[in-house]
Image: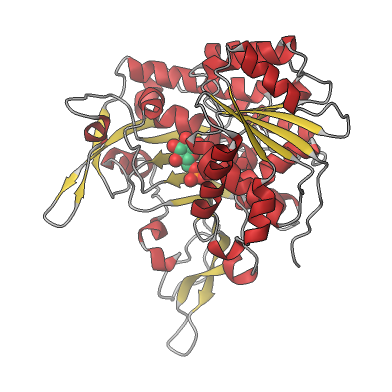
Amino acid sequence: MSARIIPVDPFDYVVFGATGDLSQRKLIPALYYRFYDGQFDTNSRIIGVSRSEMSDEEFQKFARDAVNEFVDADHIEPQMLDDFIGCFSYIANDVTDRDGWAALSDRLRNDPSVVRAFYLAVAPFLFAPICDYLSSQNYWTPDARVVLEKPLGHNLQSSVEINDTVAEVFREDQVYRIDHYLGKETVQNLLALRFANALFEPIWNSAHIDHIQITAAESVGAGGRSYYEKSGALRDMVQNHLLQLLCLVAMEPPASDEANALRDEKLKVLRALKPIVGETVHKQTVRGQYRGVSAEDTKVPSYVEELGDGATSNTETFVAIKAEVENWRWNGVPFYMRTGKRMARRASEIVIQFREIPHSIFSRTEGAPTPNRLVIRLQPDEGVKLFLMIKDPGPGGMRLRQVPLNLSFADTFTQRTPEAYERLLMDVVRGNQTLFMRRDELEAAWAWIDPIREAWDNDATPLHGYTSGTWGPTSSVALIERDGRTWHEELDDPKAI
Ligand code: BG6
């Protein structure tokens, strides 16, 4: 089946922070792909706002360069690109400058059939002045939307403050908090897998599942970014992406795919997470920071070397956590999560490890039955694998072997897998909040993260060094092996995946 493109209403997308990295690498290329696929046309406008002095033409060149660099060459057609670039204009505005705001107001169309969205790809301390202007200068309309990029706070209190500020101007149904993991195709596929198949739901519980693993490994480093130094992996990846994945795996079936039905169920999971406090922080969490490699043929800087001369840092670039969801469905089933930079490979996946069979009838076989395992691969090479036991073909007795039933999306579907932002940017225009975090979800996630962060700040858990290009500190292996389990080893062998 080929993709179905449903055109969206014309829009005025105002992107604050339009000349930043996110805009260049993700937002502009994602919008281009949607334009290329015919989801919107030249009746829509993309208005960049940023402090840099730039003309419309210079910003259009910036957008053109972004497309040329970050869009697949075989999707770039000169006329199409020209038309797309024609949607772009720019306003230099340092947010406190009244003249800049007046110019923005002139660019927006006062037509109720045009969707108005404000995308705040800026540091959160700018949310307050921007929202203030958006209310006071009448940019607000009952149907206007505001999109918030992370970091949405650095702890519960700061996230409450941000949410309060935004709530003074926008109703909750106008607020779109981005967690781009929710826009990934395979993440949405997790919903399809669980709730569009009768097969899994009856066994999706502690009676049949032994444990769950969630890994988001990156091979790149933090690159000396000052944002990362303040945030660390716990806030950067666990508080949002990994917990959202955990919610989708653990939640009860919602009554429908309506946004709040789904978000209500995710919230229940977040609230059922057993707090990790006091002594348990030491037992259930591991934090690490990558070291450099200095061999004759390879040189990789350490995290602190990337920060600059003489820097020191306690920021974690790796986290492993054993989490527990305290409810009937998941009683006694640990959720092991890990994420890190400069790991052996870029690989994100969810592993559902089923329990052992209750009794083996194969007394005279080679190879004991190995428990089933469902692997949902988010990236790269999106797909789903179900590991089953089979009899090794041919004579030689009853020899058992585990083989994967492999659904590789690349092999099954010929079309391009869309980037997460493509879906999310269009969902804003469509007014669909399903794949965005609600305020209470965000705050529940922070409430769970805060005690871990505080304990770490008080040095309750050592910061372990790990060599770049490995799977993190050995204590992460110990975290899961203490429970008689192992991390999904297939990750070590790219060819096997
Ligand atoms: C972002 C983090 O939210 O997600 C980055 O801030 C991280 O540090 C990125 O690199 C990972 O996203 P993806 O889609 O490449 O897995």
Q: Which residue is farthest bottom?
A: 395
User: Residue shown at 34%/47% (left/top)?
Assistant: 343
User: Residue shown at 41%/25% (left/top)?
Assistant: 231
Q: Which residue is farthest right?
A: 112
* Whole-percent x, y for residue 24 in the image: 52, 41
User: Residue shown at 38%/42% (left/top)?
Assistant: 480
Q: Is residue 110 visible?
A: yes
Where is residue 177, by image quadrant?
Answer: top right
Image quarter in which the N terminus is found: bottom right
For this rendering, which residue is in front, 495 or 307? 307
216 up-or-down from 331: above or below: below
For this rendering, which residue is in front, 156 or 132? 132
* Whole-percent x, y for residue 207 in the image: 61, 46
* Whole-percent x, y for residue 294 in the image: 14, 47
Horizontally, is 403 left or right of 75 in the view?
left
* Whole-percent x, y for residue 446 in the image: 54, 21
Visual colour scheme: secondary structure
463 up-or-down from 401: above or below: above
452 up-or-down from 493: above or below: above
For this rendering, which residue is in front, 138 or 98? 98
User: Residue shown at 54%/19% (left/top)?
Assistant: 124
For this rendering, which residue is in front, 151 or 327? 151
Total labels drawn: 0
Where is residue 146, by image quadrant?
Answer: top right
